[in-house]
Image (cartoon, rainbow, N blue to C red):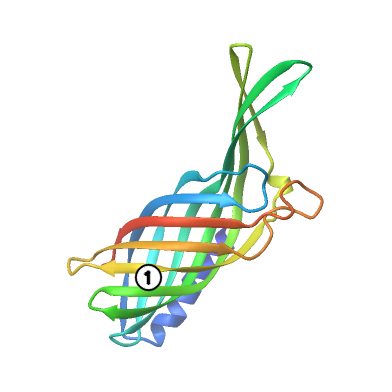
């Protein structure tokens, strides 16, 4: 984790040396995520929080590296019958990453910009919670499945942002996962992350 943060700082320092204008600050928002190729998977609501830096090369163009903690994954609801007993499952599979997007930004009009660039993700945690109901009784089953998930995730982020004159900004982005979430011999082996993000932030 320390190496991830150090690499981000080095990247930021190198970029600033080549540039005159730098803005930075916090950002946070909500995730609407899913895992592809998982049977009956539905969208899971999560969150993200982190820091953003914008290095402006001109009035129209800038580079925006970020350091973000992101809670994502998928959920599903299903019913199965075993030995004549009907059992309902309400399952949440959460995978949490430290993500480092590095986005190119182009300002279309005033504060409105488009964003596009790679994202590098480093797994922090993977947990599953299954609420099981049968014959009027409900109980929870929790497990850690971090050993089933690849420690690195790569994707592409694309979105829109709008900067207000007072330093605040709003943005919407979709992150397309390009690498498989699960290891080759595990349940998630063919899954990829897909995350819609809506959030706000402030740049000093």
Image quadrant in which you'd find residue 138: top right
Most distant residue in the top direction: 136
What residue sits 46% from the left and 69% below the top? Answer: 158
What residue sits 52% from the left and 60% below the top? Answer: 99
The vertical placement of 86 against 45, above or below, is above
Q: x, y percentage for residue 46?
A: 47, 45
Quadrant showing the C terminus: bottom left
Assign a secondary structure to mark 1: strand
Most distant residue in the right direction: 185
Image quadrant in which you'd find residue 135: top right
Q: x, y percentage for residue 80?
A: 70, 26
Q: x, y percentage for residue 180?
A: 69, 59
What residue sits 66% from the left and 21% below the top? Answer: 87
Front residue (pair 1, 197): 197
What number of labels is visible? 1
Front residue (pair 171, 95): 171
Quadrant showing the N terminus: bottom right
**Horizontal side of residue 111 vs 117, given as left or right:** left
**Horizontal side of residue 183 vs 23, given as left or right:** right
Q: Residues within 10 Å of mark 1 (few under 14, many from 20)?
A: some
The vertical placement of 21 against 23, above or below, is below
The vertical placement of 147 against 121, above or below, is above
The residue that mark 1 highlights is 53
Q: x, y percentage for residue 109?
A: 25, 79
């Amino acid at each position: 984790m320390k190496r991830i943060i150090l690499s981000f700082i080095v990247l930021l320092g190198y970029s600033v040396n080549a540039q005159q204008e730098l803005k930075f600050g916090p950002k946070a928002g909500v995730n609407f995520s899913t895992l592809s190729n998982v049977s009956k998977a539905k969208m899971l609501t999560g969150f993200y929080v982190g820091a953003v830096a914008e290095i402006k090369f001109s009035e129209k163009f800038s580079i925006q590296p970020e350091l973000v903690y992101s809670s994502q994954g998928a959920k599903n609801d299903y019913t199965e019958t075993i030995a004549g007993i009907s059992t309902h499952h309400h399952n949440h599979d959460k995978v949490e990453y430290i993500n480092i997007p590095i986005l190119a930004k182009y300002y279309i009009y005033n504060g409105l910009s488009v964003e596009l660039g790679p994202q590098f993700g480093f797994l922090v945690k993977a947990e599953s919670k299954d609420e099981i109901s049968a014959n009027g009784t409900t109980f929870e089953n929790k497990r850690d499945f971090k050993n089933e998930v690849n420690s690195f995730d790569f994707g592409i982020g694309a979105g829109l942002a709008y900067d207000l004159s007072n330093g605040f900004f709003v943005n919407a982005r979709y992150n397309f996962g390009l690498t498989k979430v699960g290891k080759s011999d595990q349940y998630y082996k063919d899954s990829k992350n897909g995350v819609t993000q809506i959030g706000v932030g402030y740049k000093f």
